[in-house]
Image (spheres, rainbow, N blue to C red):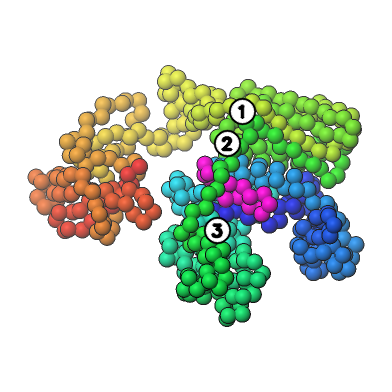
Amino acid sequence: MAVELPHLALETLARAEGDSARLTERPLLVIEDGTAPCVHAANRAARRAGARPGMALADALAILDTPELVEHDPQAQTAQIAMLAGVLLQFSDHVHPEPDARRILLEVGRSRRLFGGLAVLREQARETLEGLGFHPRIGVARSPAAARLLATLRNPAIPEDAEALRRTLSPVPLEALPLPAATREGLRATGLRQLGDLLRLSRPELARRHGPELLALLDRLLGRRTETLPRFNPPPELDLPLRLEHEIHTTGALAFPLKRLLRQAEAQLRGLNRSLQGMTLELKHREVHTRITLERGHPGIHAEDWLPLWQTRLEREALPAPVIGLRLRATQLLDPPAEGASLLAEAPGHPPPESQLPAVLARLSARLGEQAIVRLTTSGIPRPEAAQGARNDLETSPPSPAPTPAQGVCGTALWLQEPEPVPPPLHPHALGRLEDGWWDQGRDVRRDYATARDRQGRVLWLYRCLRSGRWFRQGYWG
């Protein structure tokens, strides 16, 4: 999965602004300084007037009416990419940032089952970044090069096999490929317009006319050549700076930028699978710094829990000078606490002793109604869909019968459902036979149980009815 951030410079500015009117109403340019200054990024008002990234600054000034100019900070961009790489660790353990291209790559093949498929994983990654104020373009494919290309083209396809990838890439125009200008012109001179035109030609002929680099690019796009992506190593501590575009004179006005930092900290800690119990907020003034430390009674990462504590703490603070920047730091990161059920726990992460359980159940029953609280019991019926029942008499706990021999042979799944007809599996793995009700005049059950995998890689719990010969899905294994 390639996560491209084409508007990173503008979004970094927006995160430091309490009011976004400055970034949307008037033309604004982010400038790359050097021997030939050029436009690094332009806001929507500047783009409507004709300014584009890569344009010479003199040409942009000729078509814009007194735009606001902001100098591009490559170090800040690299820091933002590193921060977001840490955030995306919650979706994959193999993250590879590419700061110069404003892009982050993730190996997500092993994460698809955990998140319910690649499409769901992609949307969760998008929602996470948009919650932090970034608007990514995301491409998913079988190779890093193809994922980069699909992200640039905003192509929503997710080609998971070689033939699907070839079909997806065939209509891509040659102008979208990362080719030298001379190679691109040579291909156009021979009448080639799309990537599919290249794939139909002889590889030796392409190499003879345009060099081996073109074949290497095609192999990387199609996943025929391995591309090594070094893993991102997150820093061992939390350090989140935020430069403010306007001075802040009161502690009450710090709530907006502080909330952004706390949300960023929460997302990064989720990616690192870490927690914290205390943090330090550094308020930057023009000549001095103010450091404030806040400790909690128990670890936690939720921004909604930390923000009111910080607001209460800042109310007691007198600012010696206007604030021009913030920096949130935590040098001691902790293992995340075990999440207990909040209805049963007296304190987060501390479940109640067994002696408190009857009182908790009584409180829930009074609040939700007696019929809303049930106890699961084993019925002793071998058929899985009828093996458990619900009882409302919470005061008594009758012993559950032991599993029947048939249940032991056929196994159990972690996700049960009513039997649902399915097509016959291709390669079933037999488990055993279950027979029940043979004494019940025509209502007997005779089943051969098996497991098989579906196209998403899930292990299905299936059986074949020996009376009709039809296959049914009983549930999912794991």
SS at circle 2 = helix
Q: Is residue 307 left or right of residue 384?
A: right
Closer to the camera in the image, 52 or 194: 194
| Residue 182 locus on image (x, y percent) | 65, 71
Determine if the magenta segment contains residue 101. yes
SS at circle 1 = loop
Say if residue 312 shows up in the picture: no
Q: Which label's residue is closer to the chain start, 3 or 1?
A: 3
Quadrant of res 407: top left
Residue in the picture at 66% in, 37% down: 265
Label number found at residue 333: 1
Q: Which label's residue is closer to the chain start, 3 or 2?
A: 3
Q: Which label's residue is closer to the chain start, 1 or 2?
A: 2
Which segment is the magenta one? 91-105
Residue holding disc 2: 272
Closer to the camera in the image, 242 or 212: 212
Residue holding disc 3: 145
Q: Is residue 200 above or below residue 57?
A: below
Q: Amino acid at mark 2?
A: Leu
Question: Contact (CB < 8 A) between labels 1 and 2?
Answer: yes
**Crowd class of label 1 (few under 14; some 14 to 19; many from 20; radius 10 Å):** some
Label number found at residue 16: none
Q: CA distance from mark 3 to mark 1?
A: 35 Å
